[in-house]
Amino acid sequence: MEFVDHLSLEKYLSDSSVQKQFNDEAKKTSFLLGKYAFRKQDRVDDMEEFILSGINELTPLYEKL
């Protein structure tokens, strides 16, 4: 999937047809799993802490892959 075609985890978890479509596409290509920081929305004072927090939050998902 292209980076511009991002899918929120909330949408993925709430719609089984979206899950099927994503899973079918993911079998044919690679995809990114990550966390966004939006410039005008999220205030990040300590970027290293923000990155570490994101890694810790996403680790359970990575372990299930």
Image (cartoon, rainbow, N blue to C red):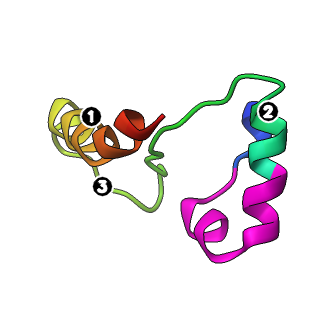
Reading the image, the residue beneath label 1 is: 51
Asked whether residue 28 is drawn in magenta, I would say: no
Where residue 29 appears, x then y in whole percent?
A: 79, 23
**On screen, residue 28 above or below 46:** above
Reading the image, the residue beneath label 2 is: 1
Left or right of residue 15: residue 2? right
Picture disc at residue 6: none
* Quadrant location of the N terminus in the rendered image: top right
Q: CA distance from mark 3 to mark 1?
A: 13 Å
Image quadrant where residue 20 sits: bottom right
Q: CA distance from mark 3 to mark 2?
A: 28 Å
Whether the residues at callouts 1 and 2 have beta carbons within 8 Å, the answer is no
Front label number (3 vs 1): 1
Mark 1: secondary structure: helix
Q: For the magenta stretch, what is the residue range?
A: 7-21
Query: Which residue is painted at 35% across and 35% down in the image?
Result: 63
**On screen, residue 51 above or below 41:** above
Reading the image, the residue beneath label 3 is: 43
Where residue 10 appears, x then y in whole percent?
A: 56, 69
Q: Looking at the picture, which amino acid does disc 2 mark? A: Met
Does label 3 or label 1 sit earlier along the sequence? 3
Please count the marks in the image.
Answer: 3
Query: Which residue is painted at 72% across and 74% down in the image?
Result: 15
Mark 3: secondary structure: loop
Q: Main secondary structure of the magenta part?
A: helix
Mark 2: secondary structure: loop
Q: Looking at the picture, which amino acid does disc 1 mark? A: Ile
Does label 3 or label 2 sit earlier along the sequence? 2
Instruction: Say few, some or many: other residues with alpha carbon within 10 Å of mark 1 (under 14 / 14 to 19 / 20 or more).
Output: some
